Image: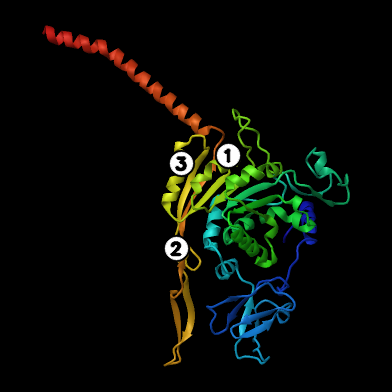
């Protein structure tokens, strides 16, 4: 027997109006569809966004988009020839996974493969939700139920009795920065991690209610446009509202020109003790760099990170990581510490994993069924690289640590000299006795 308390029943009642359970998914206008030939499933084909009046070319035949819209996922179609006759080819239609979407989407820049992108974001250890823990979100219940004296939070709620749900304008939003939009694969992975913080913004259609936002910067306008389109077209723009796309020569230039507008919306952080008035304010909750020379941007980004925020750098070569480490070592004003360095191993088409071919096959000569279980061959090997995770330290923490070490060393040196001076008379006396004898 399962017992529900009054609080549990209230929670279930509130969830009941928000939870939607679908037995199956149907294709909708704007969806990207993946087609697999039933006899050649290893060669998937992506469609353009579905729309009325459009056609999808599959080989030498075509499929009207109207014949796909409204059909359940994993339906089958037989394309028509140019003369309108059916072909003997059959395709299974599904929604592409993020991996399939990234790998088979047309590209202008080399993508970070989805498995690698997921690992990079995981190393940043981002946790976002819509509970209001960071100063934003919704209040559900009555004013009497809330253990708070904040008048802004209880504004509009009944004193007691009937439960109400009141949207609360976010006080501040968490902001993340990505330098190097490129294909948009890492952009999608980061936006997945922060997506939960923007439930109210989606429900009410108001971007000012976002609890978290990603600033994706690229110096190439064409690459930025491609990345924006790839985010917009994946799952009908599911993560599109989580990202702000910018074109700038460098992340430090964008920060210098635009940080004032966004810092006002960021998580407030008290000015560090001893910081000068010229020191830029901290408002970034994390940053990701995928740049040819990331060491040139580290200083400016580190100044804008809040304490303990991650700076994650992806590089094809480990020597680039070493350049950043050396740059930080030389410049003590950069309040960063290296927390972790890992290598992403190359894999088959997806990065970091080895694909296997596991299936049953019929032997033509005997007709017997045999098992196939071996590493997949014939596909390109891609992915791989190095990832370094740095963490923001309090203001001048490295300088203070050096001074503490120097003071400790000076104390040791002083103690050593005192010990030597105390032992000196005993040595002289021993020498005199030896000489006398």
**Residue at point 78% right, 39% down?**
148
Judging by the rendered image, the residue that carries numbered circle 2 is 346
- Give the Cα distance between marks 2 and 3: 28 Å
**Residue at point 50% right, 48% down?**
294
The answer to whether the residue labelled 2 contacts the one labelled 3, judged by CB atoms less than 8 Å apart, is no
Residue 431: where, in percent of width, then height?
A: 17, 11
Q: Which is closer to the viewer, label 2 or label 3?
A: 3
Disc assigned to residue 6: none
Q: Is residue 59 above or below residue 110?
A: below
Q: Is residue 221 above or below residue 402?
A: below
Residue 219: where, in percent of width, then height?
A: 58, 54
Which picture quadrant has residue 206?
bottom right
Judging by the rendered image, the residue that carries numbered circle 3 is 327
Helix, strand or loop at disc 2? loop
Classify mark 1: residues with Cα within 10 Å, few (<14), some (14-19) or many (20+).
Answer: many
**Residue at point 47% right, 70% down?**
355
343 or 240, nearer to the observer: 240
Nearest to N terminus: mark 1 or mark 3: 1
Task: Tell me the quarter of the image containing the C terminus.
Answer: top left
**Residue at point 53% right, 57% down?**
119
Nearest to N terminus: mark 2 or mark 3: 3
Which picture quadrant has residue 34?
bottom right
Judging by the rendered image, the residue that carries numbered circle 1 is 303
- Give the Cα distance between marks 2 and 1: 34 Å
Q: Which is closer to the viewer, label 2 or label 1?
A: 1
Helix, strand or loop at disc 3? helix
- Give the Cα distance between marks 1 and 3: 15 Å
């Amino acid at each position: 027997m399962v017992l529900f308390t009054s609080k549990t029943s209230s929670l279930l009642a509130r969830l009941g109006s928000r939870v939607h359970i679908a037995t199956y998914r149907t294709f909708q206008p704007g969806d990207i569809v993946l087609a697999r030939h039933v006899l050649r499933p290893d060669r998937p084909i992506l469609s353009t966004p579905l729309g009325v009046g459009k056609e999808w070319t599959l080989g030498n035949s075509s499929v009207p988009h109207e014949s796909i819209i409204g059909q359940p996922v994993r339906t089958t179609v037989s394309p028509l020839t140019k003369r309108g006759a059916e072909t003997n080819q059959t395709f299974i239609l599904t929604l592409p996974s993020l991996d399939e979407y990234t790998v088979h989407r047309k590209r202008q820049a080399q993508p970070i493969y989805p498995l690698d992108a997921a690992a990079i974001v995981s190393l940043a250890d981002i946790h976002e939700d819509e509970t209001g823990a960071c100063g934003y979100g919704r209040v559900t219940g009555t004013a009497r139920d809330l253990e708070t004296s904040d008048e802004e939070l209880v504004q509009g709620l009944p004193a007691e009795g009937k439960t109400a749900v009141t949207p609360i304008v976010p006080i501040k939003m968490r902001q993340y920065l990505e330098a190097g939009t490129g294909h948009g694969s890492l952009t999608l992975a980061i936006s997945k991690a922060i997506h939960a913080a923007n439930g109210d913004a989606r429900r009410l259609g108001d971007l000012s209610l976002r609890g978290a936002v990603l600033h994706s910067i690229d110096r190439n306008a064409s690459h930025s446009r491609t990345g924006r389109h790839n985010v917009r077209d994946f799952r009908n723009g599911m993560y599109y509202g989580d990202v702000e796309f910018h074109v700038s020569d460098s992340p430090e230039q964008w920060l210098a020109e635009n940080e004032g507008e966004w810092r006002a919306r960021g998580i407030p952080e008290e000015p560090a003790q001893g910081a000068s008035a010229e020191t830029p304010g901290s408002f970034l909750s994390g940053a990701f760099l995928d740049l040819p020379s990331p060491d040139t941007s580290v200083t400016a980004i580190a100044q804008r990170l809040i304490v303990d925020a991650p700076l994650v750098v992806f590089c094809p070569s480990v020597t680039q990581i070493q350049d950043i480490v050396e740059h930080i070592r030389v410049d003590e004003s950069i309040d960063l510490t290296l927390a972790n360095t890992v290598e992403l191993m190359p894999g088959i088409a997806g990065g970091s994993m080895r694909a296997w071919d596991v299936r049953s096959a019929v032997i033509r000569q005997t007709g017997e069924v045999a098992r196939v279980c071996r590493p997949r061959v014939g596909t390109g090997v891609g992915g791989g690289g190095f990832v370094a995770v740095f963490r923001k330290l309090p203001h001048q923490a490295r300088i203070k640590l050096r001074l503490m070490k120097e003071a400790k060393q000076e104390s040791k040196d002083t103690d050593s000299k005192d010990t030597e001076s105390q032992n000196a008379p005993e040595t002289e006396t021993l020498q005199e006795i030896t000489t006398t004898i």
